[in-house]
Image (cartoon, helix red, strand yellow):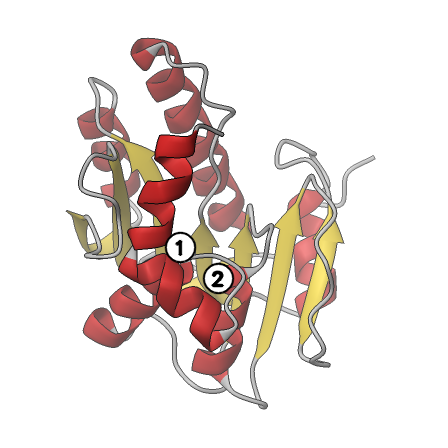
């Protein structure tokens, strides 16, 4: 980390707010703003958070669904547990073939909402970073086809680039309504954008057990 980056973070209002509120990351406000505007998550729902480490989105999701809901975090890295009985964790690779089955098992049924803040290790080569980000978004799209119930919602991170529109067209086949958006909490210089899919059109079918 450079001194310039550290100084910029200290001045970041969302970084300060996250510290004040006890959220594990400033990214929590991206999800909070979207949830308030679009009613992305509702009390009593089941939510899957892909790429959930360090846990900021888990905190927002738990607040949104309340004590009657259930939140499941998935990440290849270890996530520090949250002190709530309705927040569960899976340590797994997003590309694992049996992951949809594990998600359904933990939730005891399909999800109402699938979140994905998955992101690659940024190397600074724009075309490579963009391609890797879209690949992760497609992995999230494949998973939600197996775990999301009809009428459910999705919120998926992407980077601007030539594959963005193609991904949007692919994802639009599964949702009645959609849009690309950049929450106010996203840094202005960031190329990130989020795909918001509302009202999943497909009928949920239990995933086939993997051999």
Q: Position of residue 46 (x, y in %)?
A: 54, 73
Instruction: Classify mark 1: residues with Cα within 10 Å, few (<14), some (14-19) or many (20+).
Output: many
Kindly identify the residue that appears in the image at 26 percent across and 65 percent down. Answer: 34
Residue 85 falls in which quadrant of the image? Answer: bottom right
Asked whether, in this view, residue 2 is left or right of residue 106, the answer is left
Q: Position of residue 21 (x, y in %)?
A: 45, 76
Residue sitting at 66 percent across and 68 percent down?
Answer: 107
Check whether the beta carbons of the residues at disc 1 and disc 2 lie within 8 A of each other.
yes
Mark 1 vs mark 2, CA separation in Å: 7 Å
Question: Which residue in the protein does label 2 denote?
Answer: 57
Tell me if residue 158 comes above or below residue 49 in the rendering.
Answer: above
Secondary structure beneath dot 1 equals loop
Task: Mark 1 or mark 2: name the one nearer the start of the chain.
Answer: 1
- Mark whose residue sits in front, 1 or 2: 1
- Up the image or down, 45 lies above or below 102; here it is below
- Kindly identify the residue that appears in the image at 26 percent across and 49 percent down: 186
User: 165 or 131, which lies in front?
Assistant: 131
Identify residue for label 1: 27
Residue 67 at x, y percent in the picture: 58, 90
Viewer-nearest residue: 166 or 125: 125
Q: Residues within 10 Å of mark 2 (few under 14, many from 20)?
A: many
Instruction: Pick the quarter of the image with the C terminus.
Output: top right
């Amino acid at each position: 980390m450079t001194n310039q980056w550290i100084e910029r973070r200290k001045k970041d209002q969302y970084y300060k707010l996250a510290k004040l509120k006890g959220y594990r990351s400033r990214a929590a406000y991206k999800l909070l703003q979207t949830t308030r505007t679009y009613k992305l998550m509702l009390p009593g729902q089941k939510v899957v958070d892909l790429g959930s480490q360090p846990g900021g989105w888990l905190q927002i999701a738990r607040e949104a669904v309340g004590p009657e809901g259930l939140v499941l975090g998935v990440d290849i890295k270890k996530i520090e547990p949250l002190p709530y009985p309705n927040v569960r964790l899976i340590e797994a690779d997003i590309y694992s073939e049996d992951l949809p089955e594990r998600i359904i098992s933990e939730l005891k049924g399909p999800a109402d909402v699938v979140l994905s803040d998955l992101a690659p290790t940024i190397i600074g080569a724009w075309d490579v970073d963009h391609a890797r980000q879209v690949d992760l978004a497609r992995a999230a799209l494949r998973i939600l086809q197996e775990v999301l119930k009809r009428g459910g919602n999705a919120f998926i991170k992407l980077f601007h680039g030539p594959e963005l529109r193609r991904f949007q067209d692919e994802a639009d086949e599964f949702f009645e309504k959609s849009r690309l958006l950049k929450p106010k909490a996203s840094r202005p210089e960031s190329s990130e954008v989020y795909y918001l899919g509302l009202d999943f059109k497909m009928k949920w079918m239990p995933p086939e057990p993997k051999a």
